[in-house]
């Protein structure tokens, strides 16, 4: 006869779920859902990018907005970066009597690592947040829905053009930023010395090799791609009304910056296998 009371075996067989476990499962589930949606979004981009018609005029417009409009900020950052790195490195090299190594050391540091990463982070802060906020605003105001109704493919017009522009513009910005950084380094060397312009760059190119320049240039394409991809993804799939605009802009920068460091770590490991 059942007494309606649970025995100790029944109590032990029941699964006890604490609030912290529920939160952990919910977070893990949300992470995998986000990764799945981002993977689908990326796959759709690769399908749309090769399918005509091509939005050439919008691509050129976005290249101007993303590339040319970002140039002043990149130039100022690059100049300060080269100048400060040179000034900070001089005392340490002077202790070992190796001041002649200063131009080459600064150049290798900038071209291989500091230039691409810092430029990409500045790019993520300016372009990534701008793309995320712009597309989220269009989503909130139903402009994307209006484009679909009018027969325009909003994904190709808004997403594909921006990702392609950012992927191609960031490497160009990195090259310009590196050149300006080296000029800043030249100014820094001559603050407490007297090195001619020709001798400074001769010292640089004596130490630079192909494996310093080429991998650093290639990884900037991936940096530009991931910055624009995450900005477009967060903006295109934004919700929560006007609150989602700020959230899309903020999360675009955070995730893009994290992915830049992850990609850079992978690039360093891959490069080390061939050197």
Image (cartoon, rainbow, N blue to C red):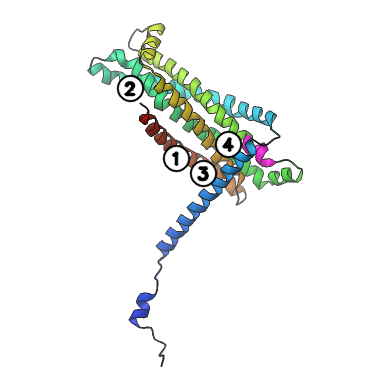
> Dot 3 lies on which element?
helix
- Cβ–Cβ under 8 Å for marks 2 and 1: no
> Dot 1 lies on which element?
helix
The total of numbered circles placed on residues is 4
CA distance for labels 2 and 3 = 34 Å
Question: Residue 238 in the image: x percent, y percent?
Answer: 60, 48
Q: Which mark is residue 130?
A: 4
Disc with the residue nearer the chain's start (3 vs 4): 4
For the point 58% across and 48% down, which residue is it? 244
Q: Which residue is mark 3?
A: 251
Q: Assign the magenta stretch its main secondary structure.
A: helix
Q: Where are the magenta residues, as a range? A: 153-160
Question: Residue 255 in the image: x percent, y percent?
Answer: 48, 42
Q: Which residue is mark 1?
A: 258
CA distance for labels 4 and 2 = 34 Å
- Cβ–Cβ under 8 Å for marks 4 and 2: no
CA distance for labels 2 and 1 = 27 Å
- Mark 4 surroundings within 10 Å by alpha-carbon count, few (fewer than 14), some (14 through 19), many (20 or more): many
Disc with the residue nearer the chain's start (1 vs 3): 3
Residue nearest the viewer, comparing 106 with 50: 50
């Amino acid at each position: 006869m059942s007494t309606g009371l649970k025995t100790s075996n029944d109590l032990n067989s029941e699964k006890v779920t604490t609030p912290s476990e529920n939160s952990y499962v919910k977070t893990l589930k949300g992470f995998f859902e986000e990764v799945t949606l981002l993977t689908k979004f990326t796959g759709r981009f690769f399908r749309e990018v090769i399918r005509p018609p091509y939005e050439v005029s919008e691509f050129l417009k976005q290249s101007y907005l993303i590339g040319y409009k970002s140039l002043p900020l990149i130039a100022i950052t690059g100049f300060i970066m080269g100048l400060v790195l040179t000034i900070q490195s001089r005392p340490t090299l002077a202790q070992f009597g190796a001041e002649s190594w200063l131009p080459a050391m600064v150049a290798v540091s900038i071209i291989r690592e500091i230039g691409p990463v810092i430029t990409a982070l500045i790019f993520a802060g300016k372009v990534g947040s701008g793309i995320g906020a712009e597309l989220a605003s269009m989503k909130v105001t139903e402009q994307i829905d209006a484009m679909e109704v009018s027969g325009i493919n909003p994904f190709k017009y808004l997403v594909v053009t921006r990702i392609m522009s950012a992927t191609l513009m960031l490497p160009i910005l990195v090259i310009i930023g590196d050149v300006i950084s080296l000029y800043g380094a030249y100014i820094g060397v001559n603050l407490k010395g007297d090195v001619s312009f020709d001798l400074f760059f001769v010292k640089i190119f004596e130490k630079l090799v192909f494996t310093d320049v080429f991998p650093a240039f290639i990884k900037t394409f991936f940096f530009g791609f991931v910055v624009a991809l995450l900005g477009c993804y967060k903006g295109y799939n934004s919700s929560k009304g006007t609150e989602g605009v700020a959230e899309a802009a903020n999360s675009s920068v955070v995730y893009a910056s994290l992915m830049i460091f992850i990609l850079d770590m992978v690039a360093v490991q891959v490069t080390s296998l061939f050197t």
